[in-house]
Amino acid sequence: MQVLVTGSSGLIGSEAVSFFDAMGFSVTGVDNNMRADFFGPKGDTQWNRQRLEAQCRRFRHLTLDIRDRTAVDQVFKSHRFDIVIHAAAQPSHDLAAKRPFDDFDVNAVGTLNLLEACRRHMPEAVFIFMSTNKVYGDGPNRIAIKEQETRWDFDDPAYTHGIDEAFPIDQCLHSIFGASKVAADVLTQEYGRYFGMNTGVFRGGCLTGPHHSGVELHGFLSYLVATAVAEGEYTVFGYKGKQVRDQIHSYDVINAFWHFAQAPRPGEVYNLGGGKENAASLLECIDLVAEATGRRPKLTYSDEHRIGDHICYYTDLRKFKAHFPGWQLTHTLSQIIEKMTCGAPHTTHSV
């Protein structure tokens, strides 16, 4: 089986490469290290590419910009792929506002280039798009919440299990990043529903793991671990540090992709995160990191929250589990943090 992975040197892309290589599949990775352009030296992913080339026997790397429509088409024209994992993205709210053309061209136009090339040359392939829960904009902030000692939580029984896929995505504030991901998200759905392609959309929560070249603008938990280990300065942006996210290990993300690829549902959408069981506030995560490392970051507080930021968000996983009952989370939040502390120099997704 042949697999194409975009953003192959990033967190989700590199996990996909390792996952499918271990299964004996041939994996082609597409990445141009644009994360270094977006975030500077700390965002550089070359170390991850080199790790994959050293460890994965069936992996080959292509340096390619997904905004280059001709080059993308040529890759699909000259190769055959059974599965396409599209994980390349501009992932930062703040950076999107500063570089809106780059953000939209990478996230929306790049996705269109890949979808159309796939439709033209191998419409039977499974095409999986790594979307984001930011397509819901700040809509989740309209849900009634309650303040507890260390976290905010939903105060509406309709959201006992978290946010599901029926939650509206329009008539709210998204950030420019959220808007570009909405465009790509809906496009991918449409190529499934309109053209009948085997497309699947996964709206990720906080995706994390030890192979994340994260920075302050993108990389919440892993950036927190790295900062805590170095006992460096960490800025809490708004909501008293009680904002809640659910964390999911990158392995569990790719395992979900594999379950979908074996029985695709064209144009389907799934929310994918750690769920309520892996949800914690920033303050609670700091305590968990301290338990694992004995160290804490030096905290500074800002009353300014990031535009479109969620006060509380965790994923309702019931739809995906109902469609694919063989899938389950394999990493608890404590286990995720423990693995990160073993690789802290490179453990650096943003609240």
Image: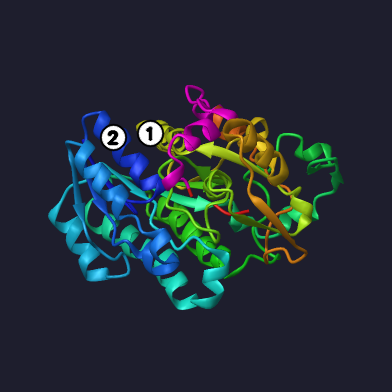
Q: How many numbered marks are there?
A: 2
The answer to which of 152 and 179 lies nearer the viewer is 152
Q: Which of 298/68 is in front?
A: 298
**Residue 4 x %, y %:** 26, 47
- Is 170 placed left or right of 115 in the picture? right
Element assignment for label 1: helix
- Can residue 339 be found in the magenta stretch? yes
The x, y position of residue 155, in whole percent, is 85, 42
Q: Which residue is mark 1?
A: 258
Q: Is residue 62 or residue 271 the one in the foreground?
A: 62
Other residues around mark 2 within 10 Å, as few (<14) / some (14–19) / many (≥20): many
Left or right: where 14 falls relative to 225: left
Classify mark 2: helix, strand or loop. Answer: helix
Q: Nearer the viewer, mark 2 or mark 1?
A: 2
**Residue type highlighted by circle 2:** Phe
Q: Mark 2 or 1 closer to N-term?
A: 2
Q: CA distance from mark 2 to mark 1?
A: 9 Å
Amino acid type of the residue tagged 1 in the rendering:
Trp
Q: Examine the rendering and report whether any part of residue 239 can be seen.
A: yes
State which region is magenta. 322-347
Image height of 71 relative to 259, above or below: below
